[in-house]
Amino acid sequence: MTRAPAACLVIPTALAALLLLVGCRETPPPSEPATGAGAPRVLPRSLVGREACLPCHRRETELYSGSPHDLAMEEATARSVRGDFGSNSHGATFDYAGVTTTFFRRGEEFWVRTDGAEGELRDFRVAYTFGDSPLQQILLETERGRLQALAIAWDTRPAAAGGQRWFHLYPNEAIDHRDPLHWTGRYLNWNSMCADCHSTGLDKGYRLDQDRFATTWKEIDVSCEACHGPASAHLTWAALDPEARAADPSAGLALSLRDSDDDEWSFSDASPNAARDTPRTAHVELETCAPCHSLRTEIGSAAEPGGSLFDRYRPSTLDARVYFDDGQIKEEVYEYGSFLQSRMFAHGVTCKDCHDPHTARLRIEDTATPDQVCSRCHQPAFYAATSHHHHRPGAPGSSCVGCHMPSRPYMIVDPRRDHSLRVPRPDLTSKIGSPNACDGCHQDRGPSWAAAAIERWFPGGRWQETHWGEALHAARSRTRDAESRLIEAFERPTTPGIARATMLLELRRLDSQATLAVVDTALGSSDPMLRIAAVRALEGADPAARMNRVATLLGDQVLAVRLAAARQLAGVAESDLDVASAAALETTLDELRRSLADNAERPEAQVELGTVAALTGDLDEAIARYQTALRLDPTTEVAAANLADLYRQQGLEGDAEGVLVSGLGHAPGSAPLHHALGLSRVRQRRLPEALESLERAAGLDPGEPRYAFVLAVALYDAGQQHLARDLLARNLDRDPSDRSSLAALAAWAASKAEREVVLGYARKRLDIEPQDPETLALVRQLEASRSP
């Protein structure tokens, strides 16, 4: 299982995985635009604070009080701190990985004695509480304006439920001060990782030259304007006379969270399911919730909600590190990416249909069960019947959410329900290894038993349908028919957009004419997520084909799409573009640089800035950015590898090796760095040492075909031809689409028997891409060699 940072967020290790929790920032009010005759006056907006809302919105304020949003962050006081800090004379203790942490009080203040960044015990003041239920973390003050979330949390559940205790968020590991997931590290830094989704009107206030934060906020918690936007213009509107108010139907609000005047649901005689009376034409509400309820990358610093989500963030697709192949939740991904997969989303359901937006709780009475939320739109006479759920009434298997929204625990004590609202598919467990709800209660029976039961109960049910997750699994397993299965699933109308975008990213490895046709379709999609994925899918395409397809998107109306296009075309010579495209590229590259600079405290942002600089020919800037990334976090392996490569390009091979050796000192298990070090030593003609490094890389990541291919070439040059051929054969067994291994094996085939082996692999390659000209030529050559 992927280790996730303890303070809220999963961070996959990828070049551009800048997955920051971002809320709404206050900016200076814009100058008032000129208005035409009779046009409503457009008012500038700024944040005013919750107290200004109270006189007219008392009911909403009462509902909000004490909600999870209200308690998202508070000053550490006797009222807000839930954990055991003992008395003023005796503290409470907790032992973990050889360190005894002491929680104690100094007068009215709360303090923690624990291991700091250097591993020595130190005293840290508790500045704030973070969250309230089912656990509460505490934020400790450290140096340079940083607040850090301690990885020891307080279980706020009742003692009878196992709560009222301190516990570590990584109980089965021994995380010390050298580990990136130590509480003093950047993954548990509140300023960068958590603050924008726990406070309102936040300004990170980061200074790169000092590596220091001076973070401020308008309100400490998630307050009214975090969702509704700055309200100053609304207050001005409310003070107008009735006639003037009527002239501005927006009421001075930054956005309206009401999609239509009539968004009710009703039943018809033909179906046990309710339907929207008015078809949904917008997703303003969902995109207001998504920034803090999704796994995503910040790309813009918009001042207020509204507009396209993709002008502020780039939501993650169904990354295999955090989702199972069928889209079920694996690591912490929040709700947005799951909900986009659901039939509920497709039929127009939105967050507030199930959740009260002010209490942030389900729309049920305190004594009711979550299933009663479902009954609002699904008639209980049909769905709560034994004929539907086939379980004893009251048993776990009769529960709507138990079967259709199974939960997984995160942060040890916090169960999160999967919001893809899917039917149980135990047959997929057998096929692709994804979990199923049935196994939660019937672990002793196994998925085949459960699949047979569902087949009996629902002979015409959805279990018969081919699930799009099977195509993703085929691609990730590198089966021969992966491309055709991905394309078929992509073209299926019922495949969710987020799954289709994920398929495009899997198709980029295959680089065939059939793949390009699918990419062309996605480039013209109305869904920004598909357009972004299509641009990224062209990474391995012919440069001319890539440029011609991507250039038009430099002027896309959505920022995330423009940035993806600019990143793809960075480094293209101005002479290769027409005048308009060249100008658009320069403008959009500036947007990309500003977007990355907004996250300057993130090593990944520095790496991307360095890469853009390198691609555009500014090598000094690129070196400086990579060095900055390593200064911020010496374990940033991409920065070390890229910096070493720039030194190599300048003929500074010794400097390149030094960077890689230093990087491995901080990240000894890094396959990319071992691989790069092996190549450096090959260039220095130190073959025995090079082989050692290349073998280490291939062993650390046996699924990466390039590592095995380069190791095979080195072995061949070292006179170990037999081992080299065997390694390439294993590489092709794992991935028949690997052109490099196929070409090398063909070149090394010295005997007729070896050529027959190569011919077999070439035919497997044609099963994947029947019209690949290089493979067709190789097959013709090998077949001709058979002739007497």
Image: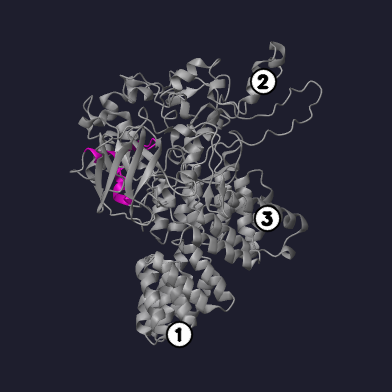
Q: Which amino acid does label 3 sit on?
A: Ala
Q: What residue type is labelled 1?
A: Ser
Q: In this view, does 15 lie to the left or right of 412?
A: right
Task: Tell me which segment is drawn in magenta.
Answer: 414-441
* Residue 567 against residue 669 in the figure, above or below: above
- What is the x, y in percent for residue 419? 40, 36
**Element type where label 1 sits in the image:** loop
**Element type where label 3 sits in the image:** helix
The residue that appears at 22% across and 37% down in the rendered structure is 441
The label number, if any, that marks residue 551 in the structure image: 3
Corner quadrant of residue 303: top right
Q: What residue type is labelled 2?
A: Thr
Looking at the picture, tell me which residue is in the foreground, 698 or 441: 698
Q: Which circle's residue, 1 or 2, is located before the other in the chain? A: 2
Q: Which circle's residue, 1 or 3, is located before the other in the chain? A: 3
- What is the x, y in percent for residue 228? 56, 28
Q: Nearer the viewer, mark 1 or mark 3?
A: 3
Which residue position is annotated with label 1? 787
Q: Nearer the viewer, mark 1 or mark 2?
A: 2
- Judge whether residue 337 is colored magenta: no
* Residue 381 against residue 108 in the figure, above or below: above
* Residue 21 against residue 518 in the figure, above or below: above
Look at the image and tell me whether residue 764 can be seen.
no
- Alpha-carbon distance for marks 1 and 2? 89 Å
Farthest-out residue, left: 444
Q: In this view, does 724 lie to the left or right of 581?
A: left
Q: Which circle's residue, 3 or 2, is located before the other in the chain? A: 2
Circle 2 packing at 10 Å, graded few (<14), some (14-19), many (20+), is: some
The label number, if any, that marks residue 106 in the structure image: none
The label number, if any, that marks residue 236 in the structure image: 2
- Judge whether residue 439 is colored magenta: yes
